[in-house]
Image: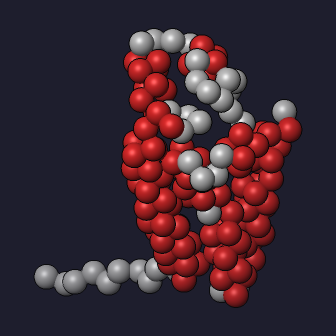
Amino acid sequence: MPTQKKPPIPISGVIYGEFIYWCTCISAMIVVFGTIKSFVEGSSSDIPVEQLLDAVFAGQSADAVWASLPVGSTPNAGTYLSLLNTGEAITVLGICFGVLSVGPAIFLSAAFMWRSKNKFFAITALFSGVFAVIAPFVFFLI
């Protein structure tokens, strides 16, 4: 029985995959650390996780949940930046790191596509990378 030869994996795909893999692993560790820190902080935190979970499981609306916490209102990016030493903010930071790592991964992949003479795919990857980097900022402006 003849053996089939696998096609070679493009280096741009390997670069993208490795970058996303390691950023996801780092992001997951940050999120786990932040979650553990949130539960260890207890009720002394500005965003007490026990009170937050109790309100969510009681079926309260999002506005009512955040109004009942010491923060007083629905948090935004500035809220988490001012509370960066809390577990909840570290958890959000880990999630943001994982999501936003897509942009640099696309740009690295595009560079290797360009070197591999896949200019059309490199250019479309650049457009995708620009969109991935700009989209979160446009979301905050709306």
Q: Position of residue 116 (x, y in %)?
A: 65, 86
Q: Is residue 28 visible?
A: no
Please report the residue visible at 48 percent of the width from the left and 26 percent of the height from the top.
Answer: 52
Please report the residue visible at 40 percent of the width from the left and 42 percent of the height from the top.
Answer: 39
Q: Image quarter for residue 1?
A: bottom left
Does residue 24 appear left or right of residue 71 in this picture? left
45 or 56, nearer to the observer: 45
Outermost residue, left side: 1
Which quadrant does the C terminus fall into?
A: top right
Please report the residue visible at 64 percent of the width from the left and 52 percent of the height from the top.
Answer: 84
Q: Is residue 26 above or below residue 39?
A: below
Please report the residue visible at 32 percent of the width from the left and 84 percent of the height from the top.
Answer: 5
Does residue 87 appear left or right of residue 114 in this picture? left
131 or 137, nearer to the observer: 137
105 or 76, nearer to the observer: 76
89 or 28, nearer to the observer: 89
Q: How many marks?
A: 0
Q: Position of residue 69 (x, y in %)?
A: 58, 24
Q: Is residue 107 above or below residue 114?
A: above
Outermost residue, front side: 44
Q: Position of residue 140 (x, y in %)?
A: 80, 39
Does residue 123 appear left or right of residue 108 in this picture? right
Q: Is residue 80 visible?
A: yes
